[in-house]
Amino acid sequence: MVAEEKTNPHLRALIRELRSPHDGKRAPAWRAVAIRLERPRHQLRPVNLGHLERVASAGELVVVPTKLLAKGDLKKALHIAALGWSEEAGRKVIAAGGQLSSLQEAFQSNPQGKGVHIIG
């Protein structure tokens, strides 16, 4: 079976951008995110805030290459970059003192991928 290419033009552009070398160097973290984004949708499971509470450290950049959902509590201030998030998840992250950004914004602010923790 041949893998189908993503049909969303914004997602395809994001994958190309994450795979391209920045300043002549490849960032393995962003390449890993691009590989996950290329998977079929049924292989991409959403991530809940309760899971991030258990596995992430306060203050680190957590990359969620799927959708972020609000199940569970978040008490740590995390910088989370996700493909998408629910409104309630966004409110919980902000209430915990953290911040949310899109994958593209996180890539542009940290193109070398230093300190990136990929979950999902």
Image (spheres, helix red, strand yellow):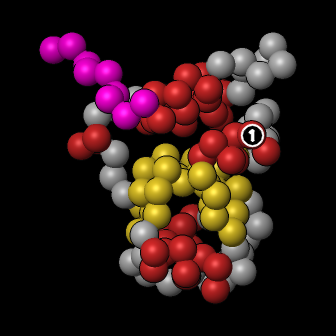
Q: Is residue 110 above or below residue 69?
A: above
Secondary structure at numbered mark 1: helix
Tell me the chief SS of the magenta region: loop
Q: Is residue 77 above or below residue 116?
A: below
In the image shown, does 54 or 29 lie closer to the viewer?
29
Q: Residue furthest left?
A: 1
Which span is picked out in magenta?
1-9
Q: Residue visible at 39% across and 78% down?
A: 71
In the image shown, does 77 or 87 lie closer to the viewer?
87
Residue occupied by mark 1: 108
Q: Horizontally, is 53 left or right of 112 in the view?
A: left
Q: Residue visible at 70% across and 56% down?
A: 61
Find residue 9 and report its horizontal and vertical position in percent: 43, 30
Dot 1, crowdedness within 10 Å: few (<14), some or many (≥20)?
Answer: few
Residue 45 visible to an observer of this rendering: yes
In the image shown, does 24 or 52 lie closer to the viewer?
24
State yes or no: residue 2 in magenta. Answer: yes
Figure quadrant of the N terminus: top left
